[in-house]
Image (spheres, rainbow, N blue to C red):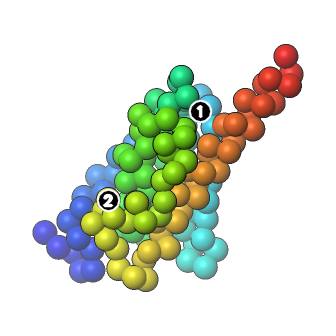
Amino acid sequence: MFCGEFNENVIDHFMSPRNTGTMPDADAIGSSGDPNCGDSLTLYLKIKNDKIEDIRFLVFGCVAAIATSSMTTVLVKGKTLEEASRLTDEDITNALGGLPEHKLHCSVLGADALKNAIDNYYFLQTEKGANK
C-alpha cells in the first residue's frame, strides 16, 4: 500500500498510532509545536528505575506529525533516560523509512517534546529533592 507521498510504515503509524492518550499520573510531560504549520505534540512519561516504563502522546497535526509522534514513543519505550535523550529527528525519520522533504519538520516535534519531557523529569526530581 502506498498513499500519495507516504510509505507503508508512515501510513501504518498514522492509521494505527501506538501509545496514544494522556497519562494522569505521568512523572514528566513535554511539549513541542511548530507555529508555522500548527502541529503540536505533548508527550507523557512514566519513569521507573531511570527507564521510560510507559509513554503516551497527544498530537494535533497532519499524517506525518501523527506518524512521527507514534514512532517516537516506539523508539524510546523501555529505554533509559540517557538513551532516550540521544534520539534525533533523523532517527525518527529513518525508523519510518523516510518522509517527504516538506514533512521532515514533523520529526522534530518528537525529538523536541521528548527532550522537554526528560528535562521536565529532571527538574521535578530536583524540586522534590529540594523540598525534603
**Of marks 1 and 2, the one in the foreground:** 2
Q: Is residue 129 visible?
A: yes
Q: Label 2 is placed on what type of residue?
A: Ala
Q: Residue furthest right?
A: 131
Q: Bin the neighbour count of mark 1 within 10 Å (Cα to Cα): few under 14, some 14-19, many 20 and up.
A: some
Reply above or below: 7 against 30.
below
Residue type marked 1 = Ala
Question: Measured from the top left, where is residue 25 in percent x and y?
Answer: 59, 28
Q: Determine whether 112 is above or below 43 in the image.
A: below
What residue is at 44 percent from the left and 56 percent from the top?
69
Compared with residue 42, is residue 3 higher up or lower down, i.e. above or below?
below
- The residue shown at (37%, 65%) is 93
The image quarter in which residue 13 lies: bottom left
Quarter of the image for the N terminus: give it.
bottom left
Left or right of 16, for residue 86: right
Residue 16 percent across, percent down from the top left: 29, 52
* Crowdedness near tag 2: few (<14), some (14–19) or many (≥20) residues, C-alpha within 10 Å: some
Q: Is residue 110 visible?
A: no
Residue at horizontal 35%, vertical 79%? Answer: 100
In this view, the residue farthest toward the top is 132
Residue for badge 1: 26
Q: Which mark is residue 50?
A: none
Describe the element under mark 2 as helix, strand or loop: helix
Residue 95 tag number: 2
Task: Name the foreground residue: 49 vs 67.
Answer: 49
State which tag comes first along the sequence, 1 or 2. 1
Specify the quadrant that holds the C terminus: top right
Count of marks placed on residues: 2
